[in-house]
Image (cartoon, helix red, strand yellow):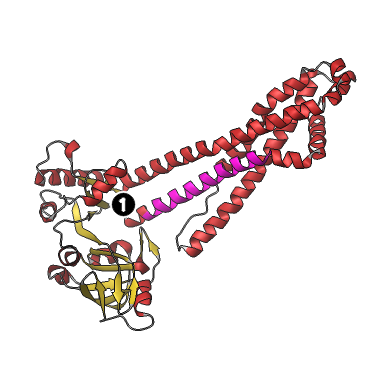
Amino acid sequence: MKLTAATSIALKALKANLARSLLTVLGIVIGILAIVLMVSLSQGAESLILSEIEGIGAQTIIVRPGRQPEGPTDIAETILSDSIKDRDLAALKRPDNVPGLDKLEPAVFVPGSASYLDNIYRPTIFGWSAEALIDIFDIKIVAGEAFTPEDIRQRAKVVMIGDKVRAELFGQSDALGEFITIGDHKLRVVAILEPAGQVSFFNIDELIVMPYSTAQRTIRNIDHYDELFIQAKEGENVDVVAEDIRATIRETHNISNPDKDDFFVNTQQNALETISTITQVLTISLIAISSIALVVGGIGIMNIMLVSVTERTAEIGLRKAVGATNQDIMIQFLAEAVILTASGGLIGTTLAVAISTLITFIIRSQFNLAWPYQVPLNAILIGVITATVVGLVFGLFPARQAAKKDPIEALRYE
C-alpha cells in the first residue's frame, strides 16, 4: 500500500471518531507543551542572567565570605559568615600582593525598611561607594550630589535614593535635604538617582545607597563586609588577579590548605560558566519530568489504538479478503498513531509558542525586566520529532495486533 493511500484511510478513520481522537492526543499535547515551554523559559532566563552578569564588566571580581556554596546549607553559612574584614582590604590594596588590582570597594547589605513621616517602604538598601555605583552601573544623578570619600571616612549619615523610593516616601515633594529613618537612625537624602529600572541584579529605582562605613559600623554595628567588588586593571589577566587575591587572603587568614578557605572568589567567567551549567542541568531535569506526560500520552494512544483494532476487526478481515497484506494493515494503523501524535506535537508546540510570548510580554511590562524572547527552533523540532517517535513506538504493538488477525476469523467477528 502506498503511504499516501494509508494516510488517507487513517485520516478518514480518525475523523470518524473525532472527539475520541482529540482526547487521545491530549497527553501528547501537554507533554510537548511542557517540554518546549521549559526549554524556552530556561533559555530566556539563562540569557537574561548572563547579560546581567556581563553588564557588570569582564574585569570585575567579587569576593564573598564563607565557603563556596554547593548546597542550601552552604548558602546559609555564607550569609552568616564574617570572615572578610579591614585587614583583608589593607592587604589586598598593597601593590606587591595584588599588582593587577585597579579598584576595590567593599559592600554591606542592610536589611529592613525605610520610612519618612507615616510613609514606609522596603527598598534594597546597602552600603557601598557612590563612585563604584556610578562607574560600574553607569548610573546618573538627576538631583543633588553623590556622597564623597570623605563621607565614607566620617561615616556620614547620608543616602542616595532611587526614583521609586523618592515617590513612595516623599510623593511629589522634594526629597533633597530631608531625613529618612532606617532602623533607629536618621539619614539625610543628598542625591536622587536617574530612573534606570533593572540594571544587572539591582533595580536602581528601588535602591538606597549609603557609605559602606555607615552601613557597617553605624547601622549594623559589625566589623566585617558582605562583599568586595574588585576591578582588575585593563588588559590584566583576570584569573591571575583572582589567584593573587586568594593567595593574599589565605595569608591574612593563616590558611595553608585551599580546602579550608573561609571565603570564595568569583570572576565573571566563573559566574557565566556556573549559571550556564545550572540552567542546563535544570532544563534537562524539567524536560525529563515533562517527558512523563509523553509516556502517559503514548500509553493512552496505545490503549485507544487497541480498542480501535478490536472495533474494526470486521473491516480488517474485509480488507484482507480483497487483497490487503499484513504490511498494508500494519502501515495503516501505524499511520493513524503517527498522525495522532504528530498532530498533538504541532498543537503543543503552537500553544508553547503562544504562552512563551505571553509570559515574555508580562515579564517585560509588569516586572520591567529585559527578558529575551526565546523559542529555539531546535526545541520545536525536538517536540514534533519526539511526538512522531512516540506514535511509532506506541503504535507498533496495536498495528502488529491488527496485521496478525486471521481474515476468516475477522470476517466472522461481530
Q: Residues within 10 Å of mark 1 (few under 14, many from 20)?
A: some
Q: Is residue 288 above or below residue 365?
A: above
Residue 114 is left or right of residue 17, and the answer is: left
Q: Is residue 326 left or right of residue 255?
A: right
Residue furthest bottom in the image: 173
Q: Could you say which is closer to the camera, residue 154 or residue 337?
A: 337
Residue 154 is situated, as x and y percent measured from the top left of the image, at 12, 71
Picture quarter containing residue 93?
A: bottom left
The amino acid marked with disc number 1 is: Ala
Dominant SS in magenta: helix
Q: Is residue 15 above or below residue 215?
A: above
Residue at 66% across / 33% down in the picture?
300
Q: How many marks?
A: 1
> In this view of the protein, which residue sits in the foreground, 402 or 49?
402
> For the point 11% across and 45% down, which residue is it?
253
Residue lying at 80% horizontally and 29% vertically, measured from the top left: 6
Q: Look at 20% across and 59% down and name the residue there.
A: 105
Q: Quadrant of the N terminus?
A: top right
Residue 374, placed above or below residue 378: below
Residue farthest to the front, as pictured? 414
Q: In the image shown, does 377 or 204 lie closer to the viewer?
A: 204
Residue extent of the magenta highlight: 25-52
Q: Is residue 49 left or right of residue 323?
A: left
Q: Is residue 90 magenta?
A: no
Q: Is residue 106 left or right of residue 349?
A: left
Secondary structure under tag 1 reads: loop
Residue at numbered disc 1: 58
Looking at the image, which residue sits at the far right? 322
Task: Assess whether residue 40 is covered by the magenta stretch.
Answer: yes
